[in-house]
Structure formats: C-alpha cells, structure tokens
Image (spheres, helix red, strand yellow):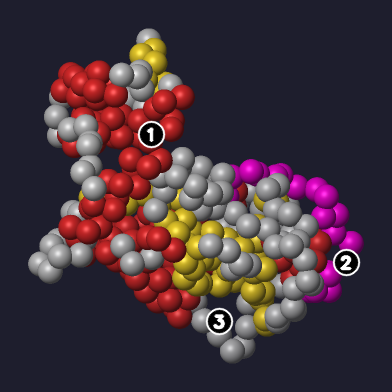
Amino acid sequence: MVRRLPPLNALRAFEAAARHGSFAHAADELAVTPTAVSHQVRQLEDHLGVALFERLPRGLRLTDHGRTLVPGLTRGLDDMARAVARLPGQRLAGVLRVSVLPSFGMMWLAPRLVRFREQYPEIDLDVDLRQATVRFDGRDSMHIGIRYGAGHYPGLHVRRLMDETVFPVCAPALVTGPRPLRAPEDLRHHVLIHDSTVLERERWLLWRPWLQWLGVPDVDCTRGPRFTDADVQIQAAVHGLGVMLGRSALVFDALEAGRLVRPFAVSRPADFTYYAVTPEALADDPAVVAFMDWVEDAANAFEHHLTPDRSERTEHVPLKQETAYESGG
C-alpha cells in the first residue's frame, strides 16, 4: 500500500502546537521559531484543504477537523519514536508525560526527580499536577499516571508503588509547650487540623476513628481548621497551628528536617495504595519502562526506610467491601 502523507515536519509542527495550544511553546519543543511552526501548520492546512486551528488573539483553538486529526497523529508519532528507541545503542530521549496528584507530586515525587534526570538526562518529563483522573483516551496525551486507590484499573498496565502510613504530627514546640503533647490523652488540649478533601471511606485520614481507636473521649472532632491543599495543611502544622494526621509520603521531608515531629508512636496503614499505570499499548515503551522501573525502585526504597519500629502501636483493620476512591493519574 502506498502511503500518501503530508510532510512529516508539518505533521510534527501541528501536533506540538495542538498539544501546547501555542505556536511559541511548540517552537520551544521543536527548537525552531514560532514563525516556522506557523508556516508548517499553514502548509499542512493547505495540503489537506481544511482549517485545523482557529487563530485567536490569545492562542489557538482546534477546529473539528483538528480535533479529529490529533489523537491518531499523536499515537503515530509516539509509535515512531518508540520504534527508533528500541534499536540497539539508542539513547532514551524525548518528552514523557506523567500525571500525578498535586500533593504527591510536590512533596514526594519532585524532590526525587533529580535522580531520574541523572539516569536519563535526555528524557524531559512533563508532569501534570491536575486533580482530574487521566482516561488515556488519546485526548490527554498522557503516558503514565500515578494513582492512589485500590489497584483495580481495567485496561491498564499496573505497577504497585507503595503503601502509606498515617500518624499524628505537629510542630516540635507543641510537644514541650505550656500544654505538653506527649500522650494521646493530651490531644484534648490541642487544635486538630483537618483535610477537607478526605472522604468517609478514607477513615484513617479522619480524626474521629483515630480518637476512638486511641480511647480519647470528649474531643469535638467537628472543630478545627480545614484545608483543601495538603501542602498548606502541612505548613500550618509546621508553624504550630495544631496537630494533623500526617501521611508518610507527604510529611517525610518535614520530619527529616525537624520541622514536624511525631508526638507519640502510633500509626495506621492508610486505606489505599499508590500505583503507577500506563496503557497496555505503552507498557513496553523504553522510556515508559525506564520511568516505571525508576519510580517503583524509589518507592520500594522509601517504603523500606519507613518500616515501623516494633514498639510502635499499629494495627491493620480490613477495609469493608465497597467501591474504592480513586484519585490522580
């Protein structure tokens, strides 16, 4: 079969402009000028006889024809890049798009990415920190998602990364302050900080089950400040606002630096686990495999480092059979 295709440079320019919504950003990726990208897209439109973009005062908007072309074109260019990467002696390079929850991305993943960069200096990560769950349907152009849930992801290749541990944390000053916080009973005298995005099924991120488990009565669990952003919640605790339920992956750096402390040795396994997922069609892509291997190794090392002391009070209560909350990636 004879393949009748427009010029490859024009296809690449259009795909990059569609992905970025900008000729300028596409030009940065392709190492050409915005004028060159605009010219290549216009050449492609002339070749196809249809308009692919609406040129707006502040950017670009795909036409119906453009939206029809983008998914298949992105898959085709990705397939070509993977085919070349599989050749012996080829260095892994290009853009790898990863979707991750903002909290996990900022407080666990980002501090470790320098190690990935050292191993794969020619792979440029494009990290998406939006809350929305990626569907891998071609419109989002994502390669990998890091998800927090029960691990059931039909149609996706799944790697378990790590479990999470939950425990109370606070600023060091609260432990030795006017009302020392040294035992669970002392929580009566302190402000409880809440994560307002937590669902009821994530019970070990909620104070009520904790206080019942610890046997601390007479504490009003409805009181205390609430935050929708984990980073802001942690900063509030660091500055002495109160006591929060810390998630091991998110508070590790603050604990290591001494900005937060664990006032007493109690912990619970979190209700869900972190997973890395990718479409089955990308599961053997060399760059995807490189990132999946790296993040799995990093998570395993982190989880091993956090193995609780045997003297610590911890207990695992099986989850009820219910639909698990899935988030991220």
| Disc number for residue 96 | none
Distance from disc 1 to disc 3, alpha carbons, whole Å, reads 52 Å
Whether 63 is drawn above or below 236: the answer is: above
Mark 2 secondary-structure assignment: loop
Q: Nearer the viewer, mark 1 or mark 2?
A: 1
Magenta stretch encompasses residue 219: yes
Q: Which residue is mark 2?
A: 217
Answer few, some or many: residues within 10 Å of disc 2's Cα (few below 14, many 20 plus, some between 14 and 19).
Answer: few
Indicate which disc, 3 or 2, sits on the residue closer to the N terminus. 2
Mark 1 secondary-structure assignment: helix
Whether 160 is drawn above or below 241: the answer is: below
| Disc number for residue 69 | 1
Q: Nearer the viewer, mark 1 or mark 3?
A: 1
Indicate which disc, 1 or 3, sits on the residue closer to the N terminus. 1
Residue in view at x 56 percent, y 72 percent = 163
- Give left or right: position of 258 versus 193: left
Residue in view at x 65 percent, y 61 percent = 245
Expressed as whole percent of the image width and height from the top left, the position of residue 203 reads 75, 64
Q: Which residue is mark 3?
A: 308
Magenta stretch encompasses residue 293: no
Range shown magenta: 212-232
